[in-house]
Amino acid sequence: MRRTLIHAVALITALLSLFSVPASAAVDKEKVTIAVGGKGLFYYLPLSIAEQLGYFKQEGLNVEIVDFAGGAKALQAVVGGSADVVSGAYEHTIKMQEKKQYFTAFVQQSRAPQIVLGVSTRSMPNFKTVSDLKGKKIGVTAPGSSTNMVASFVLDAAGVNPSEVSFIGVGAGAGAVAALRSGQIDAISNLDPVISTLEKDGSIKVVVDTRKLDATRKVFGGDMPAASLYAPEDFIKKYPKTTQALTNAIVRANRWLAKATPDEVLKAVPASYHLGDPDLYKQTFLNIREALSPDGSISESGTQTALKALAAYEDKFDAKAVDLKRTYTNSFVSKVPRQ
C-alpha cells in the first residue's frame, strides 16, 4: 500500500512537471537592466510598483533598475550599452531618429508629462510673465531631459529664446528642493513630489502645470505621451518574450494603481520617496492619479502632439524625416492577459 502510494505521488509529480514551466523559461533574456531618470518621481510610479510588488519576478525577470539624475542621462546609459531599456519620456524616441538611432516605446506608464514650471517666490517675488525669466537660472532634472524640453517649449511660446536662460541640472529629489530654497536657481521645471513639496510652503509660484490632462492639452494642443519603457529596435526584435514580460509587469502596475488607496501606495514605495512628508505624498498621489496610464497603451494622436512639440522648440528639427510608426508600438500591450 505504501509502495503504491509512493509510486502514485511520483507519477503525479512527473505529470505536473510536464505542464508547469518555470517563469524564466518564458523569457528570452532573464537579466534586464532598466535605466531611469528620477526613480522616486510619480512620473515613474508604475515602474516602482512593478518592482516592489514583485511583478517583474513573477514574469521570470531579474530586473535591475539604475537611477540617474534625469531622462537624458538614462538614455545615454542604454546608448552606451550599460543598460538595456529606458524608463523615460516617449519623445526621446523621436529625437533619437535625428541621429539615426531607432528606439521604440512599448508600454506607457503616464499619459501626461506631470512637469511643472514654477518660479521662486524668494528670487522672483515680482514675477509677472514668462518673459521675466530671461537671463535667469532654471533648474531641470538634467540638461536635455523632458523637464528641459517643457521649459524650453514654454519659453519659446512666450517669445524667449531658450538660449537666453541658464539650465542647471538639479536632479529629481531632495537636492532639487534644496537648490530652489537656497537660491541656487530662480525657477524650476520638475515633477512630484518635488513640486508639491515646494508648493506646500510657498517656495514657488506655479506658471505652467501639466499634471492634469486638461492642462496638458492646453499647453501642447493635445494628448502628450509621457513616461514609457522604450528600447532599441534591435533589443525588441531579439527579445520579444522579455519585452512582453516587461509590458505585462507594467500594465499590472498600471491596473493596481488605478484602484489603489493612497495608504496602499505609501506602503508599497520606499520611505525615501516621501521626502519626509508621508501625508503630502498621499495627497499628491490623488492629485496626479489621472496622469497615470490606466492600461499602458500609447495614443496615436499623442505621438503626433509630441512630434509637433519637438518641432516647435527645436529650430533645426525636421519633423518630416521622422517615421512615427517606428517610435512606438501597442502590439505588446494588446497581448497582456485580461484581469
Image (cartoon, grey):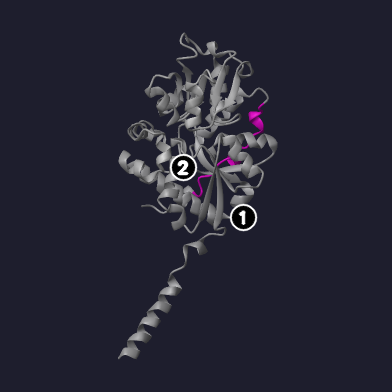
Viewer-proximal residue among 91 and 337: 91
> Where is residue 311 shown, x and y percent of the image?
61, 25
| Residue type of the residue flagged with mark 1 | Lys
Q: Which of 206 and 18 is in front in this view?
A: 206
Could you tell me residue 337's position as x and y percent?
Answer: 41, 54
User: On the rendered structure, is 257 left or right of 85?
Assistant: left
Mark earlier in primary sequence (2, 1) = 1
The residue range painted magenta reads 317-332
Q: Residue 297 carries which label?
A: 2
Q: Is 48 rendered above or below residue 176? A: below
Q: Which residue does the image show at 34% across and 89% down from the upper left?
A: 4
Mark 1 crowd level (few <14, some 14–19, many ≥20, 10 Å Cα): few
Tell me if 144 is positioned left or right of 2 in this view. Answer: right
Q: Position of residue 8 (x, y in %)?
A: 35, 84
Disc ID at residue 238: 1
Name the residue: 35% across, 44% down: 267
